[in-house]
Amino acid sequence: MYLEAIVIYSFFYIESCLENFFLPKIIGTEQTKLVSYCVSIIMLIIIGFCGNLLYINKAKRTIKKVEEKFPEYEQQKEYLNKKGGTTLLYATILLIIIIVAVALS
């Protein structure tokens, strides 16, 4: 899930960099600001939907594995409570990418 999020965020960051470096030469600085704001809003909405979709898909996979592994509901519930949470490694990588992106902006 986090690896997919990193790929998606990287794609949007690259698009933003290209927008800032090449678009002003094509349409001018003032129009670039307007386009940049519109694209930013659209990208934020898309990132939100993608994040939700990634989370739902991961949750479905986890639940399916648990249902196959444990026949009883209470065992499933206990395992899911233990399994839940965030993987620190990917969350840290994503945080570093965000910090670097903000620092370079």
Image: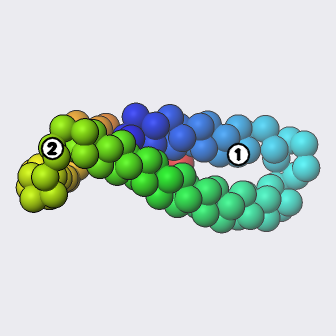
Q: Mark 2 — residue? A: 70
- Counting from the top left corner in percent of width and height, residue 10 is at 53, 37
Q: For the N terminus, which image quadrant?
A: top left
Q: Amino acid at mark 2?
A: Phe
Residue neighbourhood size for the residue with mark 2, other residues' Cα within 10 Å, grouped as few (<14), some (14–19), many (≥20): few
Q: Is residue 83 above or below residue 48?
A: above
Q: Quadrant of residue 49?
A: bottom right
Q: Position of residue 54 (x, y in %)?
A: 46, 48
Query: What residue is shown with label 1?
Result: 20
Q: Secondary structure at mark 1?
A: helix
Answer whether residue 94 is visible to the viewer in this image.
no
Residue 2 marker: none
Q: Residues within 10 Å of mark 1 (few under 14, many from 20)?
A: some
So how many labels did they put on this image? Answer: 2
The answer to which image quadrant residue 70 occupies is: top left
Q: Residue at x 54, y 41 (%)?
A: 8
